[in-house]
Image (cartoon, rainbow, N blue to C red):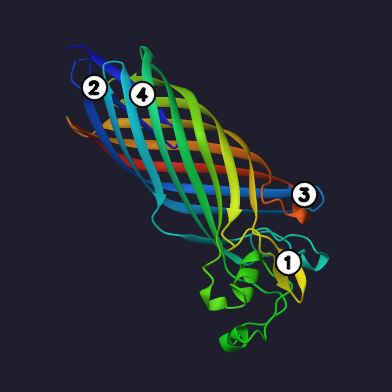
Amino acid sequence: MKARHYGIALLAGGLSYSTNASDKATFIASIAYQDKKLTFDQQYSGTQSNSADFSVHIPVINFSLTTAYKKFFAAVKLEKNFSTTSTTTTETDRSADGEINLIALQGSDVDVSREDVSLTLGYNAWRTLNLFIGYLNGETELTPDPFCADLVLPIDADDIARGQVSCTRTNRAGFQFFLGDQGFYNSQPEYRQTYSEDGPYIGASYSFRFQELGTLSLSFAYADMEGEYKDNANDPDAIFNVDGEASFLPFNYRGDTRGTSIGITWTGSLGDTTAYSLDVRRQAYSMDGSDKTGAANLQGVKLETDEEMLGISAGVQFYF
């Protein structure tokens, strides 16, 4: 029976394998470890301006399940960090000038996590050339530590509860923590920010077979998605106040997100029903966002978010 080779490449990872050209469906389950370097860069522009960026390595576990039938294939993939990584930002504190602090003040900590879910449908168009379309939902979650430039820690919790502690120069997590829900800080949920992209992608992959040594697969995909950057402050209509002056509204920026994924995958046999894979993949997304809360102080403010991920993966595939 003549073997047909499929080189499958997902936007969020890579997978290639061989199967027989028969009327029976082939299934492949895969698990892999990935070191993901995430570079995150944001810039406000317009009536107010500021910028923040950081770079962090995130340990990620990948799961995927693929099925192939004749010239068609489908794959679902989950990528999720198995521990949260802490880093620091380069953002400068501009609250004294009445401008917005984005993530955390310069040098303060922020926890970073990342999750991607993708679905890919593909077709073996010619020899080892595959065309595919898919859908990706990805989310980066940021949890800044509360930081107050006015105060020296530690702070007595009773003083906070009695309203005897104020903080005028802080990151947004500090406002959430010190002000709390109507002044009761201990009923306030942990402050978080999320940046997400959601939408379709299209791409192609091509594979080279090296006798019994293994298979090298190259892939490229282009994504045209919707992006959103928001926080979880309680009430979008309730203005938080410091000393009687408005401090910030919960924010929500949305806009078009476009990006590419370029990958190279090496797959080698470990036996009749198993294989190993090594994958290097670069993903880059960019969102041009605008405020969707309707806040007067954010009118005319634009938010550009650039997110780049470089992932190096090693995993095992099981055929059945």
Name the residue that disc number 2 marks: 19
Callout 1 touching callout 2 (CB < 8 Å): no
Mark 3 touches mark 1? (CB < 8 Å): no
User: How far apart, in angstroms, are the residues tagged by discs 2 and 3?
Assistant: 56 Å
Q: What residue is shown with label 3?
A: 299
* Sooner in the amino-acid sequence: mark 1 or mark 2: 2
Q: Which residue in the structure is indicated by mark 4?
A: 7
**Relative to residue 72, is residue 58 drawn left or right?**
right
What's under tag 4, amino acid-wise? Gly
Q: Which of marks 3 and 4 is nearer the N terminus?
A: 4
Label 4 crowding class (10 Å Cα cut-off): few <14, some 14-19, many 20+? many
Q: Which of marks 3 and 1 is nearer the N terminus?
A: 1
Is any part of residue 290 visible from this angle? yes
What x and y, as percent, mark residue 156?
Answer: 59, 87
Q: Is residue 11 visible?
A: no
Q: What x and y, as percent, mark residue 63? A: 33, 42
Q: Quadrant of residue 3?
A: top left
Instruction: Say which residue appears at 38% left-offset and 25% top-offset.
Output: 121
